[in-house]
Amino acid sequence: MVFGVTDLSAYAVLVHICRDDGVQRTRTEFVTQCQMHHFDMDGFEHFEIITNVDDQLVVYIGYNDRMSFYTSKGDDGTTSLLGEGRVAKYHVRIEAMGTLDESSAALGLARAQCRDPRSGGVLLEVQRDLYKLMAEVAATPENAEKFRFIDAARVTWLEERTDELSKFVEMPREFIVPGDSVAGAALSLARAIVRRAERRIVELADTEEIKNSELQRYLNRLSSLCFVLELLENKAAGQKTTLAKS
């Protein structure tokens, strides 16, 4: 068993190495000799033995110990953009970025609970799209082109996924009530947040803070995809979608 981690910052994990593991016996004996001391193992990061529990070594692994999770630069109530200058944290652009961040988090919550095998892959790709969409929103107008990724082709991709998945669900003729499955409820929450993100993007477009009209089109289509996925996940959970009218 070899532990090798890259691209991690200020991150710690616990690793249990069994003393009776023949493959790791030599390594474990070496680690034991270094108890309560930091040392390098095979060119990786710093290890520290914490204690022995049930004949196992509990090992602390620290990555980039000198790095910090905070900078304090925003303590004055402002934040930087991808470009020159800083704006207030309540600026409409920052509100849009925050809502897009919420959208991705809600989609991640849904993805973690999806049962239909088709849902997870689509949601992950959407989350990656939102990551790139956020970059364009975070850029100042003169730099936005450098971060442009969402275009008509990405909107078409989203429409195609929605149309494809809609073939496997029965579309209700009335409004529905969320909550018939865990993943379905999470997707309904994500849909509502995505709609709020769309409103923030439209506001930025109306004030000419952003120029790419495909951003709002993408978010509009994404809310439709979330709805179809909610129905799909209700079906995968063996639940009938509840209508708003009793």
Image (tube, rainbow, N blue to C red):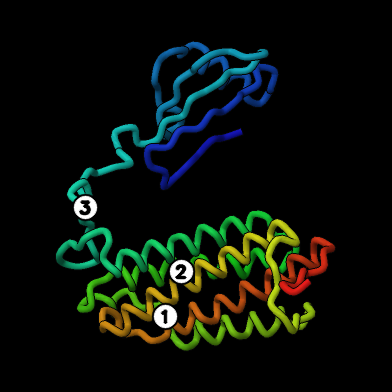
- Please name which of the two marks, 3 or 1, marks the residue nearer to the observer: 3
Q: Is residue 79 above or below residue 7?
A: below
Which residue is tagged 1?
215
Q: Quadrant of the C terminus?
A: bottom right
> Which amino acid type is shown beneath numbered disc 2?
Leu
Of the numbered discs 2 and 3, the one sitting upstream in the chain is: 3
- Quadrant where the N terminus sits is top right
How far apart marks 3 and 1 lie (CA) works out to 27 Å
Q: CA distance from mark 1 to mark 2?
A: 10 Å
Q: Please rate how many residues cluster around mark 3, counting C-alpha atoms within 10 Å: few if below 14, some from 14 to 19, many from 20.
A: few
Residue 188: where, in percent of width, then height?
A: 62, 66
Q: Residues within 10 Å of mark 1 (few under 14, many from 20)?
A: many
Question: What residue would you read off at disc 3?
Answer: 77
The residue that label 2 is drawn on is: 130
Does residue 3 appear to the left or right of 101 in the view shown?
Answer: right
- Residue at screen point 26% across, 65% down: 91
Residue 164, placed above or below residue 28: below
